[in-house]
Amino acid sequence: MDTHRTRAHLLVRVAVVLVVVPVAFVVALPMWSEIEVAVVGQALGLAGVDATRVDHQLLLTGDRGTLVLIVIGWCSSCAPVLAVVAAAWVLPGARRRRVGSALAASVLLMVGNVARLAAIGWFGTTVDPAAVDGFHDGPATVTSVVLVLVAAAIVSLAPMGPPAQRTPPGQPARRGQPARRAVIASAAASPARNAPST
């Protein structure tokens, strides 16, 4: 009965995720992308790159040239963050550990993606503008994949608490150690039945 109830509860959570996450992505993406672009622009400004923001785009000017950095849905960390939060909500385990793992994975994804986007902008304006497409499709894409895999590992491999102790067959379940100690103390205080007489 408990197994069927647990499965039903899990299926309900999965159904809710399948409905809520796409809607949340569509609603949150515009503002999310603008915030990421603003943070990337600030980071590139500290690196000496002139950045002008227009919505979810950055006009970047550096020592080697000019670049327009556009952050679309696939470039944003919005979808991966929603995915790890949804996974942490669906997976079993202690609530505190699931919340902590989702928070850690989300911070990793957001900070890592900002660093990735800033690296693309810096490379295209400071190092080699002609090779920026290769940098985007190569190291930057690999970095994105690694970030997602590490975030997934954090959520799925988070400690779920110690396993429940099983009571050996034929023995009553023990609720705590104090009762056992009391029984041992009582047995030690009782005289032995088979003690030889003198």
Image (cartoon, rainbow, N blue to C red):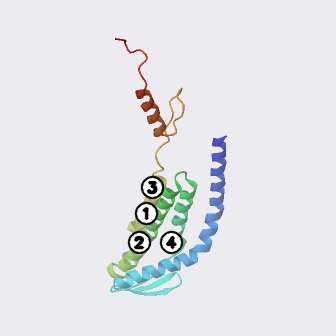
Do the CB atoms of the residues marked 2 and 4 lie less than 8 Å apart? Answer: no
Q: Earlier in the sequence, mark 2 or mark 4?
A: 4
Q: Secondary structure at mark 4?
A: loop
Name the residue rendered at 38%, 85% in the picture.
45
Across and down, in percent, residue 133 comes to 42, 73
Residue topped by disc 3: 153
Locate the C terminus by quadrant: top left
Q: In whole angstroms, how far apart are the C-alphas of marks 1 and 4?
A: 12 Å
Do the CB atoms of the residues marked 2 and 1 lie less than 8 Å apart? Answer: yes
User: Which corner quadrant of the image does residue 22 belong to?
Assistant: bottom right
Q: Secondary structure at mark 2?
A: helix
**Left or right, 96 with reference to 115:** right
Residue topped by disc 4: 76
Residue topped by disc 1: 147
Q: Residues within 10 Å of mark 4 (few under 14, many from 20)?
A: many
Q: Give the label on residue 116, or none.
A: 2
- Discs 4/3, front: 3
Q: Earlier in the sequence, mark 3 or mark 1?
A: 1
Across and down, in percent, residue 182 comes to 46, 35
Q: Give the label on residue 169, or none.
A: none
Q: Secondary structure at mark 1?
A: helix
Q: Give the answer, above or below, for where 85 lies relative to 180.
A: below
Q: Nearer the viewer, residue 117 or 2?
A: 2
Question: What amino acid type should be assigned to the residue bearing mark 1?
Answer: Leu
- Numbered marks: total: 4
Question: What amino acid type should be assigned to the residue bearing mark 4?
Answer: Ser
Q: Earlier in the sequence, mark 1 or mark 4?
A: 4
Q: Earlier in the sequence, mark 2 or mark 1?
A: 2
- Whether residue 78 is visible, yes or no, is yes
